[in-house]
Amino acid sequence: MSETTSRRLINITALLSLLAIIAVTIYWYRIGVFKNLSNLQNYLNGTGFVGPLIFIAIQIVQVVIPIIPGGVSTAAGVLLFGPWQGFLYNYIGICIGSFINFFLARRYGKPFILHIVPEKVFEKYMAYAKNQQKFDMFFAVAIIAPIAPDDVLCLIAGLTHMKTRMFSWIIILGKPITIAAYSWALIFGAHWLLRLFG
C-alpha cells in the first residue's frame, strides 16, 4: 500500500466513523434517548446484543483512529452499561483495537504511523526502542499506567522486534488494570460529586 493510499484510507475511515457516530447521535436524540441517563440505559438494554456491539465497534475505531479521547469513551461504557458490563465491553474493544494497531504498524511501518501520530511524538517513543529488552519492560509498565499513550505505544511496538506472544500477554493482562482504574475513578468521582452537590 502506497503512502498516498494509506493516508486516504485513514482519512476516509475517520470521516465515515465520525459521520456514523453523528448519525446515531441524531437518531437517538430524535427518539428521546438523551432525555436522561435512565432512558439511554433502558434503550441500550432493549437492543439486545446490538448496543454492546456498536459500543465495542466505537472503542475499536477510537483506538485505531483517535477521533474521540479514549478516556471519554471508556467512561461512557461504565455510565451506559454499568461497571461490570461496561468494563467487559471496554476491555474487548480496546484489546481488539490494540492488536489492530500492532499488526498495522508491523505490516505498513513508519509511514503509516506518521499518518496518525505527530513525528515528534513518534521520535520521542522510538527512542525507547533502541534496546528491545528495555522497551519491552517500558511497554509493560506503560500499558498498566492509566496516563500512558497506549495507542501510540502499540503502534511503536509493531515496529520493534517484540514477539507477538509477549505483546499479547502484556495487553491481555495489563489492559484490565488501566480500564479498572478509569472505571473506579469515574464511579468514585460521580459519588463524590453527588455528595458535594447533593
Image (spheres, rainbow, N blue to C red):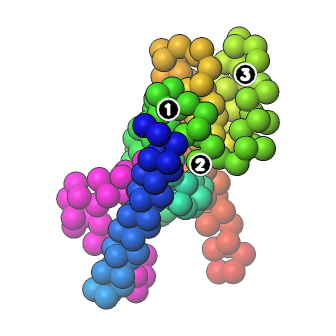
Q: Residue at x 27, y 64 (%)?
A: 45
Between 185 and 141, the one nearer to me in the picture: 141
Between 78 and 50, the one nearer to me in the picture: 50
Between 27 and 126, the one nearer to me in the picture: 126
Q: Examine the rendered structure and indicate whether residue 174 appears above or below residue 167.
A: below
Q: Earlier in the sequence, mark 1 or mark 2?
A: 1
- The secondary element bearing badge 2 is classed as loop
Q: Earlier in the sequence, mark 2 or mark 3?
A: 2
Q: Earlier in the sequence, mark 3 or mark 1?
A: 1
- The secondary element bearing badge 3 is classed as helix
**How far is disc 2 from disc 3 in space, using C-alphas?**
19 Å
Q: Is residue 141 magenta?
A: no
The span picked out in magenta is 34-61
- Quadrant in which the N terminus is drawn: top left
Residue that badge 3 annotates: 129
Of circles 3 and 1, the one toward us is: 1
Q: Along the horizontal axis of the image, is 53 left or right of 72?
A: left
Residue that badge 1 annotates: 108
Residue that badge 2 annotates: 116
Of circles 1 and 2, the one toward us is: 1
Q: Position of residue 190 (x, y in %)?
A: 61, 66
